[in-house]
Structures are given as structure tokens and as C-alpha cells.
């Protein structure tokens, strides 16, 4: 018993940290309908500024005022004015991508301002970490632990009171359902939204400054990983109850410590289990907490009918002769592209273009998933990793040709995809997004660490394929192969779009209930698409790994998955050309920026991608469609003018 | 002080590229009851949305009590005395009944009076009192419409716009809704009633506006409506 308690007590501060972040998530979700994945990033920003201030010799209260009382709400204000107010009445997907963009951009911006590198032992806010205040069954409780627990309790109490017993709290809760209805009640929805973003940002800042010393060092990644624990805590509270979220977080922290206390140390499983635990908990909650289902499928805004429907895709509205002409044009462009990469383009650029097309295959999986079925996956890079490691391990241990390996990779990734999607899909888009995020982090921490899969940081080697006499170790030859594989994947995607499944998905996007009533099985269609999409990502990953001649767990981490979603959403998630454009844009930007930037400014790329999400929030059709629409409009207008003249 | 509570002049409005209203103009007098009728898709709900500021017209002007409110956000228009119970579900489904009422009452009134207004609302609608801590989304359709009407009781608005409030209700519940509307009219509120139930609406209204494909085709007294128009309206909207 004493042993049990002495293992459990250190879990309390961790638990409080999870709880505090979880409460922040619940608060923003309840008040703005945004599942704010950037919450951890906001916390990091305040923690970083606090650290810098203290390091420059400021007294702690002054540093606290600057980093939490001033900076955090200002950050919230900026995000609301610049981004979130435009997505207030938009669908869940758009809000999620907007938050993802912030998740990527905020740490990058702050690291450009404070180029610090590694920051160790962040200062604690109130009490000293080296003073032991009292003992619980022999366990010393130091200042950090004490202040974390006390502050968390205080915050939970204050927020619960505000949320349930004040006018502003009531207005914030009403906002989540329908900002327009709030306006009809005579309340300025804009300022309520602004206030709730400032409040939640303040909470993030407070959490960040408090959390930093618990980790020992200050890294943006720590805060992102924490997010899954926070999500699991929020899920325990059904995304609505603050007390249950608090309890969930607390339990999670304690169980995590118990596990690492009792499990043998020094193995992948025990070192990875603490970060992996939230995923397991989240999945269990999704499966066994029936109340979640009601909460997660957001109640429809009764005034959604005021919004005009999204404009049809350009390709759908184009007349036939124009479409034929543009098809010929596109064919010529592709031919020109391929021929020139085979002749005059330098080998290093052939390599870059190969990278772009391999990425385009991965991005294509998002076009299928997000563009066609309206779901979102935050672990496409993980599926790509599964594909790459499958092909590599098969080649290394069983002497399987990489080409055959790619096919197996597709099957394996597809199967894993189906397994991930099955439990979460019933709960709708948001649950799927969170489950995939948790799955990705689990793979980062455990799955890809074993030598039989990704072999951690050191990675594995993946040879180039060969086909009879043709060996693809030549860059140009492999480039041709990638073009062929990409074309096959494109054919698969268009076949699905035009076939029964595509029609079913289109019907499901209209109304799931109506579709089910005419005999469409929503889960089947969605799992199928998710699985195919994972398979395509797996193919892309295998192709990419083989291009690079090897891959490690780092090449396919979850942060990359998030970047992928943002990039594809920005460039165009509805069409095949969007995926190809995204691949090209990603590589070209990377080459242009990372080649000639110092470490400090290498963050610029992430800032650009993050801001891309802002563009997406305003124009969900994506850049490619936008340009097409403009061109089309100019075409048709000129057509009309010439008709009039004639 | 003008005599018109709402005036639309030359209003055009639409959704994206789609235009739903073409050059719509009309006036509503203080304390009057107006029925806005027309076939499905004529643009009745669009008129209601323009009037309450949910939708900004692409051309034309909207005046409330003679004050120009074109382009104002909805909450500001509402603060000038326009209440709008929108089509479909006119309440917050995720809030309980009491919170639905408090949201409006506590914005309009000081704390003490708001609490009294809450009591009065429950007295007027005992069914809501029984369900005060139930989520509004789980109320029956009729109870939801009652809740929507109860919200305007505390401070009678100058104009109440109700959009198909009787849709899908049993005849007896429809009676109740119209009784409540009559009470609200008697407290001095002007009504703009968008209705499926033509004869019900015409019983209450002294003024009739008919909308067809985004244009006004009749604007005048509802008493002297020609038999031709009346039977046409009834044919378009068969009464249940
Ligand atoms: N959000 C929207 N986007 C695009 N078009 C819309 C939208 N809402 C309404 N419309 C169109 O505007 C026109 C007028 O719609 P409105 O809802 O005002 O009609 P209504 O007279 O209220 O019809 P009903 O009796 O069916 O409620 C219709 O043709 C409708 O299709
Ligand atoms: Mg209508």
C-alpha cells in the first residue's frame, strides 16, 4: 500500500497539468465550438516569454504580468480578430484546420523572436522546487507540485462558477450552439467570442508557465504531446463537464505514474507507455462512454440556413468544350513536365521533383478522405511511415522486391487504417480527428521505436526497386516510376469518386440520416474510404522512403501529419490537382527557404504553412480552385464580350 | 416619432450569387398585425432575415422606427425593439429552458426585475415551468415554440417576426400559439407573421403582403382581399 501510494503521489501534479489543459479545451469548445488544438502552443508561448524575462533578470511577478496577464489575452485577441471570428459559423472541419494552423505557426513565430535553443530547468512561478513542504506517506511534496495542485483547484472552481452562474458564462455557452441565435437574443456575439478567446488564452498562458518546470526543459513538442492527455481528460468530461475533466486528468496522471512505477524500466514499452497511455484511455472512452456520442456530434446551428452554400467546384460548373480544352492543356503540361525532368533538369531537381510527387501521393490520400468524405485524419504521416517501414523490412528480412513491398505496404496501412477508424467513426468527424492524432503520437513514441518497425531515430534503410532488367536506382528512372504510381493512385481515387462509394459519400455529406434511410451504411462507406486513404498514404510513404533510400521514425512524425493537413487544405483539398500542387508547393518552399536560412529563420516555413490555414479558413476551396475560378471567370467574361461585339 | 415600425425600401437580397429578393418595399405600422404569405421559396424567410439584420441586403434600405439600420449587426437591430423567432428550431437546444429565458431577460432587465419576469413567464406557460431544467432541444416542437414566445414576454418588443411558428404542430397547439400571439399583440407589439396556415394568419392579421418569386404581388388590407386571391392563397397552401 505504501509502495502504491508512493508511486501514485508524484502523478498528482502531472494529473493537475492534464486537467488544466483539458479544462482549457472544454472551455474553448463550449464557448466557440473550436476544438482548440493550438492550446498547447499558446501555453508554450507564455512559458517561453516567462522564461526569457526571468533569464534577463526580471522579477518573477513582472515576468508573470508580461507573459500571462498581458501577452496571453493579447494573443487570444489577435487570433480571434484575425482568424476565429471568420470561422465562427463554419463547419467543424474548417475550425479544426484553423486551429491546426495556429498550432504550427505560434511556436514558430515565438522561436523566431526568441531564438534560444535548449532551455533547461524553467523557473517555477510561486514556490521553490527545491523546498519540500510536507510529506505524503514518505513522499516529499515540493513547491512546484504544491503550487500546481493548488492553482489547478482554484482555476477549476473559479471557472465552474463563472461558467454556470454568471451572465457572461451563459452567453459563452450559448455561443457554441449558434452565434446568430445569440445575436437574436440581443447580445453582441462578436464581443462574447472575443472575450472567451481572451479568457481561454489567459488560461493557456497560466497553464504554460505552471507546466514548464514540471518538464525540466522547455520545448514546443512537450506541449503538443501533452495535448493528447488533455484531450483524454476532456473526453472523460464528455467535452462539457469541468469537474469530470478535472477528475479524468488527475486519474490519467496517477495511472501513468503507477504504470511507470510497476513496469520494468528501460524498455520501449515502459518508456513509451506514459505518452501512449492517453491514447489507450481515449480509445476506451470513445468505445465505452455512450454519452460522448451525443456530445461530439455537434448540435446543428438552427440558423445555418442563412449561409449560402459553398460554390460548386470549378470543374463541375465548366461547360464541355472548355473542359475538353483544359484537359488537353493539362495533358500537354504533364507531358512537358515529365519530358523536361527527363532531359534538361538537373539531377538534384529531379530528386526534388520526385520528392514532390511522392508527397503528392500522400496528399492524394487526404484529397480522398477530406475532400470527398469530409473526414479528417491527423495521422497520414504515420500511415506513410507504416508503408515505408513495411517495404523496408520486407526487403531487408525476406528479400521481397520493393515493388511488391509497396503493394504489401498498401495492404498493411489499409488494414491498420480500418482498425483505427472503426471505433472512432461512429462518433463523427471530431472524434476521428482526435483518435488519429492520438494514434499518431502512440506510433511516434512506441510503434516506430522497435527495431522491427521504424527503429527509432536511427531508422532503417529502404532500397530502390528493380523490375527485371530495369533498375530504378537511377534518379530519372525512379522519377518515371513515381509518375506511374501517382497516376495509378489518381485513377483509383477518381474511380472511387465516380463509383458507388463516391455517390454514397456524396449522399452522406448531404444528410447522414437521410442516406441511412435509403439503405446506405454510413460506417461501411466511411471505413472503406478511410482504409483506402490509409493505403494510398502507405504507398506514398514507401515510395518516399525508397527515394530517400531509408527512413526513420522522425521522418514520419505526427507534427508532419498536421503540417500535411494544413498544406493540402491551403492548396486545395477537393481536387487531384490540389494534391499535386500541394506536393510541389511543399518541396519548392522547403528548398527555397531551408537551403539559405539560418536556424532562426528556418521557422519561417512553419509560419507560412500556419498562415496558409488562415487563408483556408477564409477560402475553404483552396488556392488551386481559387485561381481556376478567377481564370474561368475571365474566360467566360471575355467570351460574353466577344459575343456582344459580334 | 414615425408611425412605421419597419420599413423596407427597394430591398434586394440573396445568398452568395443567388438573388432571392428583388426590389421589395413595404411599411409596417406600429401595433399592426401583418401576414406575409406566398408559396415555398418565395423569399418570406429572407424578408424576415433582412428585417432582423441576419442578412444584409445588397441594395435598398431597412428602417426601424424611422432609423436606418441597413447593414447593422443583428444584435443592434434587436436592441432597437425587433424580435425574430426564426424558422425551424427557434431556441438553444443545448441550454436548459431556464437558461434560454435568462439569456434574454437578464440582458434586457436589471437582476431583480428579470427574476420577476422569469416567474411571470412560468406562470403564463406552466408547461415550461415543469421543464425548467430540461434541455430545450429535448422539448416537443410545440413547447419549443412556446419557449420562443415566452422569451419576448418580459419586455414586449416593438415588432415581433415569427417565421412558420405553427409548422408541424397539432391543431390544438396551433390554437395555443395563436392565443399567445394575440396576447403579445394586445401588449402593443406589432407582428409580422409568416405562415403556412393561411386562414389562421388572415384571422389575426389586418394587413396582408403576398410574395412571389422574390417580388411583392399584393400589399394591402387583408379584409378586402378578392376571393380570387384568397382562393389562390388557399390553393397554394392547403390548410390542415
Ligand atoms: N442559405 C441559402 N443559400 C442559397 N439559397 C437560399 C438559402 N436560403 C434560401 N435560399 C433560396 O432563397 C429563396 C427564398 O428562400 P426563403 O427561405 O426565403 O423562402 P420561403 O418563402 O421562406 O420558403 P418556405 O415557405 O419554404 O420557408 C429560395 O429559392 C431558396 O432556395
Ligand atoms: Mg421560410
Image: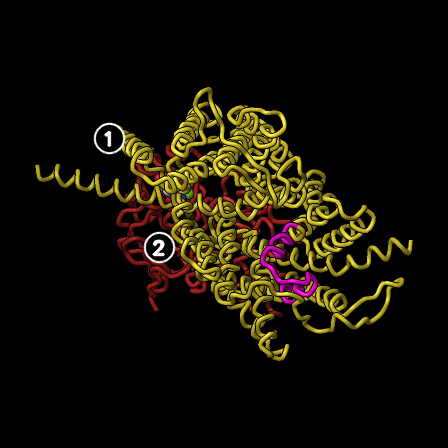
Chain colours: A yellow, B red
> Circle 2: is it few (<14), some (14-19), or many (20+) Cα within 10 Å?
many
| Residue in front for this viewpoint, A92 or A395 | A395
Residue A22's place in the image compared with A202, above or below, is above
Quadrant occupied by the N terminus of chain B: bottom left
Q: Are marks 1 and 2 on the same chain?
A: no
- Distance from disc 1 to disc 2, alpha carbons, whole Å, reads 39 Å
Where residue A345 appears, as percent x and y from the top left, is 32, 39
Identity of the residue drawn at 62% across and 25% down: A398
Identity of the residue drawn at 73% across and 43% down: A269
Numbered range of the magenta stretch: A207-228
Q: Is residue A186 visible?
A: yes
| Residue in front for this viewpoint, B27 or A335 | A335
Where residue B78 appears, as percent x and y from the top left, is 44, 61
Residue assigned mark 2: B56
B85 within the magenta span: no
Identity of the residue drawn at 35% across and 59% down: B71
The secondary structure that most of the magenta stretch takes on is helix
A213 within the magenta span: yes
Provide the secondary structure element on which disc 2 rests: loop
> Circle 1: is it few (<14), some (14-19), or many (20+) Cα within 10 Å?
few
Provide the secondary structure element on which disc 1 rests: helix
Residue assigned mark 1: A325
Where residue A445 appears, as percent x and y from the top left, is 66, 46
Residue A140's place in the image compared with A181, above or below, is below
Label 1: chain letter: A
Q: Is residue A85 visible?
A: no
Is A237 on the left or on the right of A185, as rendered?
right
* Residue behind label 1 places its C-beta within 8 angstroms of ligand 1: no
Is A336 on the left or on the right of B128, as rendered?
left
Where residue B67 appears, as percent x and y from the top left, is 34, 66
Amino acid at each position: 500500500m505504501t509502495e502504491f501510494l508512493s508511486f501514485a503521489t508524484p502523478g498528482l501534479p502531472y494529473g493537475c497539468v492534464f486537467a488544466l489543459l483539458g479544462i482549457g479545451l472544454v472551455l474553448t469548445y463550449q464557448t466557440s465550438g473550436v476544438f482548440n488544438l493550438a492550446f498547447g502552443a499558446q501555453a508554450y508561448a507564455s512559458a517561453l516569454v516567462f522564461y526569457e524575462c526571468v533569464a534577463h533578470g526580471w522579477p518573477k511577478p513582472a515576468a508573470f504580468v508580461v507573459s500571462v496577464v498581458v501577452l496571453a489575452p493579447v494573443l487570444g485577441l489577435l487570433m480571434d480578430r484575425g482568424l476565429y471570428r471568420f470561422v465562427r459559423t463554419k463547419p467543424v472541419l474548417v475550425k479544426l484546420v484553423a486551429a491546426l494552423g495556429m498550432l504550427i505557426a505560434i511556436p514558430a513565430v515565438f522561436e523566431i523572436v526568441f531564438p534560444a535553443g535548449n532551455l533547461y530547468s524553467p523557473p517555477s512561478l510561486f514556490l521553490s522546487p527545491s523546498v519540500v513542504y510536507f510529506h505524503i506517506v514518505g513522499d516529499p511534496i515540493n513547491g512546484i507540485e504544491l503550487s500546481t495542485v493548488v492553482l489547478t483547484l482554484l482555476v477549476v472552481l473559479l471557472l465552474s462558477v463563472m461558467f454556470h452562474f454568471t451572465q457572461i458564462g451563459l452567453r459563452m455557452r450559448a455561443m457554441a450552439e449558434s452565434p446568430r441565435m445569440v445575436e437574436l437574443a440581443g447580445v453582441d456575439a462578436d464581443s462574447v467570442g472575443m472575450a472567451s478567446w481572451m479568457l481561454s488564452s489567459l488560461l493557456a498562458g497560466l497553464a504554460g508557465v505552471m507546466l514548464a518546470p514540471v518538464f525540466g526543459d522547455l520545448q514546443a513538442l512537450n506541449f503538443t504531446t501533452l495535448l493528447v492527455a488533455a484531450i483524454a481528460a476532456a473526453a472523460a468530461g464528455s467535452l462539457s463537464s469541468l469537474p469530470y475533466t478535472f477528475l479524468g486528468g488527475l486519474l490519467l496522471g496517477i495511472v501513468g505514474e503507477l504504470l511507470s512505477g510497476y513496469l520494468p524500466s528501460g524498455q520501449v514499452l515502459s518508456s513509451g507507455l506514459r505518452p501512449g497511455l492517453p491514447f489507450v484511455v481515449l480509445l476506451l472512452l470513445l468505445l465505452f462512454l455512450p454519452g460522448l456520442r451525443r456530445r461530439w456530434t455537434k448540435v446543428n446551428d438552427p440558423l445555418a440556413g442563412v449561409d449560402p452554400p459553398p460554390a460548386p467546384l470549378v470543374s463541375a460548373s465548366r461547360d464541355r468544350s472548355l473542359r475538353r480544352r483544359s484537359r488537353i492543356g493539362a495533358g500537354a503540361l504533364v507531358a512537358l513536365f515529365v519530358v523536361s525532368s527527363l532531359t534538361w533538369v538537373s539531377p538534384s531537381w529531379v530528386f526534388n521533383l520526385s520528392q514532390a510527387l511522392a508527397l503528392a501521393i500522400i496528399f492524394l490520400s487526404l484529397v480522398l478522405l477530406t475532400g470527398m468524405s469530409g473526414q479528417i485524419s491527423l495521422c497520414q504521416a504515420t500511415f506513410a511511415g507504416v508503408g515505408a517501414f513495411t517495404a523496408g523490412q520486407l526487403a531487408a528480412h525476406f528479400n521481397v522486391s520493393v515493388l511488391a513491398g509497396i503493394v504489401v505496404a498498401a495492404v498493411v496501412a489499409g488494414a491498420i487504417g480500418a482498425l483505427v477508424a472503426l471505433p472512432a467513426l461512429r462518433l463523427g468527424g471530431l472524434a476521428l480527428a482526435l483518435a488519429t492524432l492520438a494514434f499518431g503520437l502512440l506510433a511516434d513514441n512506441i510503434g516506430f521505436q522497435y527495431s522491427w518497425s521504424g527503429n527509432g531515430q536511427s531508422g532503417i534503410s529502404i532500397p530502390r526497386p528493380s523490375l527485371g532488367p530495369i533498375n530504378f536506382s537511377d534518379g530519372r528512372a525512379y522519377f518515371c516510376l513515381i509518375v506511374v504510381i501517382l497516376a495509378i493512385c489518381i485513377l483509383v481515387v477518381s474511380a472511387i469518386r465516380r463509383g458507388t462509394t463516391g455517390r454514397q459519400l456524396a449522399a452522406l455529406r448531404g444528410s447522414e440520416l437521410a442516406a441511412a434511410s435509403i439503405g446506405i451504411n454510413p460506417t461501411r462507406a466511411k471505413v472503406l474510404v478511410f482504409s483506402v486513404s490509409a493505403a494510398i498514404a502507405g504507398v506514398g510513404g514507401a515510395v518516399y522512403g525508397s527515394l530517400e533510400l531509408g527512413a526513420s521514425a522522425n521522418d514520419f512524425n505526427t507534427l508532419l501529419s498536421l503540417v500535411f493537413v494544413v498544406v493540402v487544405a491551403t492548396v486545395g483539398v477537393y481536387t487531384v490537382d490540389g494534391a499535386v500542387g500541394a506536393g510541389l508547393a511543399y518541396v519548392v518552399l522547403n528548398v527555397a527557404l531551408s537551403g539559405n536560412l539560418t536556424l532562426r529563420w528556418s521557422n519561417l516555413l512553419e509560419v507560412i504553412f500556419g498562415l496558409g490555414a488562415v487563408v483556408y479558413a477564409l477560402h475553404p476551396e483552396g488556392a488551386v480552385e481559387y485561381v481556376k475560378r478567377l481564370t474561368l471567370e475571365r474566360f467566360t467574361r471575355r467570351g460574353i464580350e466577344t459575343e456582344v461585339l459580334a | 416619432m414615425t408611425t412605421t415600425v419597419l420599413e423596407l425600401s427597394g430591398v434586394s437580397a440573396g445568398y452568395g450569387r443567388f438573388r432571392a429578393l428583388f426590389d421589395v418595399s413595404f411599411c409596417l405600422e406600429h401595433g399592426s398585425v401583418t401576414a406575409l404569405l406566398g408559396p415555398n421559396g418565395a423569399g418570406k424567410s429572407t424578408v424576415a432575415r433582412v428585417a432582423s439584420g441576419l442578412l444584409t441586403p445588397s441594395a435598398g434600405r431597412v428602417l426601424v422606427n424611422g432609423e436606418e439600420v441597413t447593414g447593422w449587426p443583428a444584435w443592434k437591430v434587436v436592441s432597437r425593439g425587433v424580435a425574430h423567432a426564426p424558422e425551424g428550431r427557434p431556441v438553444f437546444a443545448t441550454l436548459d429552458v431556464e437558461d434560454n429565458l435568462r439569456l434574454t431577460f437578464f440582458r434586457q432587465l436589471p437582476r431583480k426585475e428579470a427574476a420577476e419576469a422569469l416567474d411571470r413567464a412560468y406562470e403564463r406557460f406552466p408547461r415550461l415551468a415543469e421543464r425548467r431544467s430540461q434541455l430545450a432541444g429535448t422539448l416537443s416542437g410545440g413547447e419549443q415554440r412556446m419557449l420562443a414566445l415566452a422569451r419576448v414576454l418580459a419586455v414586449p418588443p416593438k415588432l415581433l417576426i415569427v417565421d412558420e411558428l405553427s409548422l408541424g404542430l397539432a391543431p390544438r397547439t396551433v390554437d395555443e400559439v395563436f392565443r399567445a400571439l394575440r396576447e403579445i399583440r394586445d401588449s402593443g407589439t406589432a407582428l409580422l407573421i409568416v405562415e403556412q396556415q393561411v386562414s389562421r394568419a388572415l384571422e389575426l392579421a389586418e394587413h396582408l403582403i403576398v410574395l412571389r418569386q422574390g417580388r411583392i404581388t399584393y400589399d394591402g388590407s387583408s379584409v378586402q382581399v378578392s376571393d380570387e386571391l384568397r382562393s389562390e392563397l388557399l390553393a397554394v397552401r392547403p390548410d390542415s
